[in-house]
Image (spheres, grey):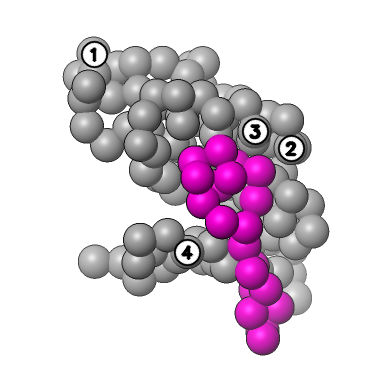
Amino acid sequence: MFTHVMIGSNDLERARIFYNATFAALGGAPGAIDSRGRLIYTHEGSRLMITTPINGQPATAANGGTIGIAAASPAHVLAWHDAGVSHGGTSIETPPTERPNGIFVAYLRDPDGNKLTARTQTAP
């Protein structure tokens, strides 16, 4: 259904450091800067794009928005969370945990305040 998710950043270099670390923890590749100056991460046909707002106003995090990222295993979720906290992110909600339905999940805010979650796709 979706081709991509675009979020804003007030500091693309800070975002690049954070997202390169968290995607590496999931086995992903570093982001690339496109010809328009946007930071782009691709994986299995999906794209996460990070940009400074084109209207020149400061980027703000979506109130109520969360971006979900698929992880292959609970170990990947933990590595993602640890990489994020080590690279400018903030752990939020509960610590990384297994939910009653067997899904393993963790939550972070990126350095710009965007809410992210990594989780296993299916119960073990």
Q: Where 102 falls versus 109 (above or below)? A: above
Answer with mark 4 or mark 3, whichever residue precedes in sequence: 4
> Label 2 near label 3: C-beta < 8 Å?
yes
CA gap between label 4 and label 2 equals 20 Å
Label 1 crowd (10 A; few <14 / some 14-19 / many >=20):
few
Q: CA distance from mark 1 to mark 2?
A: 30 Å
Q: Which is closer to the viewer, label 1 or label 4? A: 4
Q: Position of residue 56 (x, y in %)?
A: 75, 76
- Give the CA separation, mark 3 to mark 1: 25 Å
Please give left or right for residue 17 compared with residue 46 in the image. Answer: right
For the record, the magenta segment spans 20-39
Q: Position of residue 27 (x, y in %)?
A: 50, 45
Q: Which residue is mark 1?
A: 100
Question: Visible in this render: residue 54?
Answer: no
Check the picture and name the quadrant holding the C terminus: top left
Which of the two labelled residues, at mark 1 and mark 4, occupies the earlier sequence position?
4
CB within 8 Å, label 1 to label 4:
no
Q: Secondary structure at mark 4?
A: strand
Q: For the residue marked with disc 1, what is the amino acid?
A: Pro
Q: Which residue is mark 3?
A: 83
Label 2 environment density (alpha carbons within 10 Å; few <14, some 14–19, many ≥20):
many
